[in-house]
Image (tube, coloured by chain):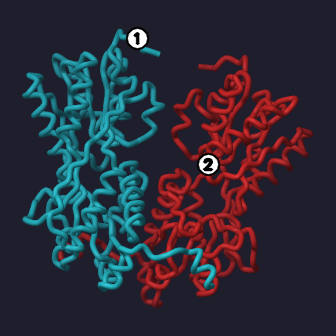
Chain colours: A red, B cyan
Amino acid sequence: MLAAARELGYAPASTARALARGGTGVLGLTMTTYGDLPVPYTEIPYYAQLTLGAMAAAHKRGYLLQVMPSSMSPWMWLNTPMDGVIHVDPRAEDPVRSLLRERGIPMVCEGRPPQPHWGDAWVDTDYEAGLHLLLDHLTQSGARRIGLSLPLHDDAYPDLIAHAYRFWCDKHGMPALVEEYAPLPDPFAAEQDAVSRLLDHDPSPDAVVGVYSDSGHNILAAARRHGLRVPRDLLVACVSEDPDYATTTPPVTTLSLDPDRVGAEAVDLLIAVINARSGVDRHRLVQPVLLPRRSTRRAGKMPSK
Amino acid sequence: MLAAARELGYAPASTARALARGGTGVLGLTMTTYGDLPVPYTEIPYYAQLTLGAMAAAHKRGYLLQVMPSSMSPWMWLNTPMDGVIHVDPRAEDPVRSLLRERGIPMVCEGRPPQPHWGDAWVDTDYEAGLHLLLDHLTQSGARRIGLSLPLHDDAYPDLIAHAYRFWCDKHGMPALVEEYAPLPDPFAAEQDAVSRLLDHDPSPDAVVGVYSDSGHNILAAARRHGLRVPRDLLVACVSEDPDYATTTPPVTTLSLDPDRVGAEAVDLLIAVINARSGVDRHRLVQPVLLPRRSTRRAGKMPSK
């Protein structure tokens, strides 16, 4: 047993300190909730990578990360000791947010809360930089009318995307072509219909951008339905972490939000908040990364390899 | 608050029962340990997917899953209440296994323990079926001398793979060509050297199989060093969950161990062990899945699309 203890190593100093102070050494991570509707977020690449990135960062700092299910009950918060919580994708009137606030549990939001309060701490994507990267790339590939397929949802994400898109269009004298859709109950059909409406615009768009992980598949399907070839007749891109886009026909250009980094920043900020450190930046933006693929290669231009 | 509680839904029945019985409703998941050497297992696709698969299964059953870091201290076990633990990849003389056993914590192993005890409960891959799938596929693609690049390590995995490989070679009257390597401190150089030694055999192999996630990259690198073209001069395959093999040059055939399913089975078995259910199968084999890609396409045979 002593030999085992030796081989098991030493407690990282930060957690030893947390325990000495009466902390639990445990950080929580929770999605927002949709009540009894479970969200299979470990299967959605963005949330899966965010979770693993936050876990790796917590372990490096000597903390455990307790990941809560999306459809959970208040008792879980009462029975699960933790020093603070990362709250992922807060919605408007978010019951998880209210509960954490009422109980005075230190909290960091992943994604800006739609209803900000003084003292909020959050990590989010720099959407303005991301849309700039993506829309500039499409323009360089020849696009002049870029459509946006936009979900209606009560977290801040669609609004921030739409704002960054309109800002870029204004700045570049390009038309803003937006079709909205309600992602529930059938996100695939709803987005394909929204893209169809975009493609029916006159003049029609020469590029379409989607903002959810499955958007690329939905835009490709809608393009096929309209008899359009990608990228010859239409450029296609979406915000996604899904590696499957490397092997679709054609492979689809994606904007990655770098969820590993977002998770690590959220852990870093939460530990600062728990320890009431002053002088830390409580609003942090992570830079997205563009992964250009064949779906946005300029029509008529030969591939260089 | 009441409205929030309502929207947060109800406690799943199984956890309500666990709590009523005095359980914690928390399952642990832990890698084996390498003492103070941290293993970045959330970045290794197999362990990342295993973790997420186990987490999804635990949440579905109304449990939380507490994932422990690989280099941890005994105090973490004393301070982290849990009903039972999934122990991933037990090694020979495993200190985590000894500690769990001494404390009487219900335990399920992911991967057969090298030193079995009566009453062990484990989930593992059906390696015999997996090697059968993979080696038959290589034979159908024309391979007659299949080399195996084999790591030396004190968990059961390399032994089980080597055993299944030799069994298949005997059965099919094929030569067994094995080169071993020590994966630490530099797994890339060590495996590339092992593959080089395989390729120096006379007559040389017409296919090489690796068993770790990076093996495909290492075999491709060694083949390049020997001036061999893949798949024309050499077929290449490895056991891996890494989606990057869909886009290597050429894309590499992989055997997937279905870690989502392994994680879900481990959770199911652990809950049965915690509840002392009789009549459950305590040794469970998960079937692997072959993903054929261009690295094993028969030389001279035109692709069908």
Position in image of residue B79 (x %, y %): 34, 83
Count of marks, rendered view:
2
Position in image of residue B115 (x %, y %): 10, 59
Badge 1 marks a residue whose secondary structure is loop
State how far apart marks 2 and 1 are (Cα).
Answer: 40 Å
The chain containing the residue under callout 2 comes to A
- Near-viewer residue (B193 or A54): A54
Relative to A239, B101 lies left or right: left
Position in image of residue A153 (x %, y %): 70, 58
Name the residue rendered at 58%, 31% in the picture.
A251
Name the residue rendered at 74%, 68% in the picture.
A114
The C terminus of chain A lies in quadrant:
top right
Name the residue rendered at 22%, 55% in the picture.
B123
Query: Which residue in the protein does label 1 denote?
Result: B302
- Near-viewer residue (A226 or A123): A226
Relative to A57, A121 lies left or right: right
Residue type beneath disc 1: Met
B280 above or below A23?
A: above
Badge 2 marks a residue whose secondary structure is loop
Position in image of residue A132 (x %, y %): 77, 45
Which picture quadrant has residue B144? Answer: top left
Query: How packed is label 1: few (under 14 Cα within 10 Å), some, or many (20 or more)?
Result: few
B300 above or below B69?
A: above
Query: Which residue in the protein does label 2 denote?
Result: A186
User: Can you see residue B65?
Assistant: yes
A157 above or below A215?
A: below
